Image (cartoon, helix red, strand yellow):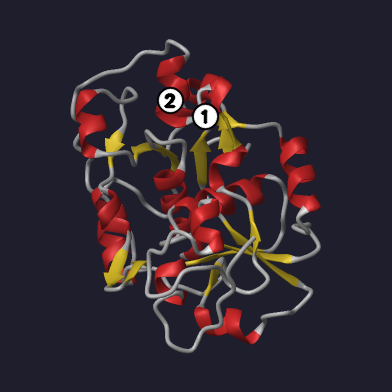
Amino acid sequence: MSDTPLALVLPPEALDAARARDGVVLVDAGSPESYVKQHLPGAVFLEYAWIVDRDPPRMGLLPPPEQLARVLGALGITPETHVIAYDDEGGGRAARLLWTLDVIGHRRFSLLDGGLQAWAGEGRPLETAIHVPRPAHYPVPAVSGQGMATREEILARLGDPGQVLLDARSEAEYTGRKVLAQRGGHIPGAVHYEWTRAMDRQRHLRLRPAEALRDELAALGVTPDREVVTYCQTHHRSALSYIVLKWLGFPRVKGYAGSWSDWGNAADTPVETGA
């Protein structure tokens, strides 16, 4: 593999050169229906359910390390592999895979900017052949907690000016008008930045210019000098927010696995409603 690292957010026009390197695996994290219909040449399929765990009503949890090792090995991924991930929705599912890799200490990964939407929308080739990866050995990882926030940690730091909570859900969920748990609303003090605001719909869901995103986030108090915790309903949408913040150069970012399905269904967590 080349010593020059690949970009965290990889533009579609750079994919062919990136894939020519040794040790690169392209992962389609979209829906099974989308993959069967058409996908990027050479992509292997990841079923999203394989990288999330559930303990109803808490959803979107991090699976046991043993499960993650089996899934990654089945995709032909080793600790030395550079994973390039994409999906058919603009990046949420793919970003959840990359967040998971980050949490287990796997640092070689990229998000394909715009995913299938940008690739196909800009006239690049697609295929229907199903690729079965050659299994590899991925040792059972140790989850250090880096990149991951827990309910207990968030509770302990509520009101801490050194931390900001970023809610990536819809406005209706944030204000409490749409309730998807026992209680609706948001974590006290959290700012609202709906996940698709980072996407440019005129450019097939590629990310918008970095400076524009930095300015919008700064106006909400989301600045690089603070630790940022992203959450949504199950840390699916907010996984993209996590990767975007990393791309923007934020040094301390965490994702809240379980997110509102954990917080909103707990009996001892404070909740705010309204804008």
Q: Quadrant of residue 131?
A: top left
- Residue 201 vs 262, above or below: the answer is above
| Relative side of 261 to 64, left or right | right
Residue 218 at x, y = what percent?
A: 79, 51
Residue in front for this viewpoint, 136 or 71: 71
Residue 89 at x, y = what percent?
A: 41, 36
| Relative side of 226 to 71, left or right | right
Q: Quadrant of residue 49?
A: bottom left
Q: Residue at x 48, y 60 (%)?
A: 177
Residue 28 at x, y = what percent?
A: 33, 37
Q: Which mark is residue 260?
A: none
Q: Residue at x 51, y 51 (%)?
A: 170
- Residue 70 vs 217, above or below: the answer is below
Earlier-in-chain disc, 2 versus 1? 2
Compute the Cα span from label 2 to label 1: 7 Å
User: Is mark 2 in CB contact (under 8 Å) with mark 1?
Assistant: yes
Residue in front for this viewpoint, 3 or 247: 247
Q: Is residue 42 visible?
A: yes
Q: Quadrant of the C terminus?
A: bottom right
Q: Which mark is residue 205?
A: 1
| Relative side of 35 to 87, left or right | left
- Residue 155 vs 172, above or below: the answer is below
Residue 208 at x, y = what percent?
A: 65, 32
Amino acid type assigned to the residue bearing label 1 in the image: Leu
Amino acid type assigned to the residue bearing label 2 in the image: Gln
Q: Residues within 10 Å of mark 2 (few under 14, many from 20)?
A: many
Helix, strand or loop under label 1: loop
Q: Is residue 107 visible?
A: no
Which residue was labeled with disc 2?
A: 117
| Relative side of 251 to 17, left or right | right
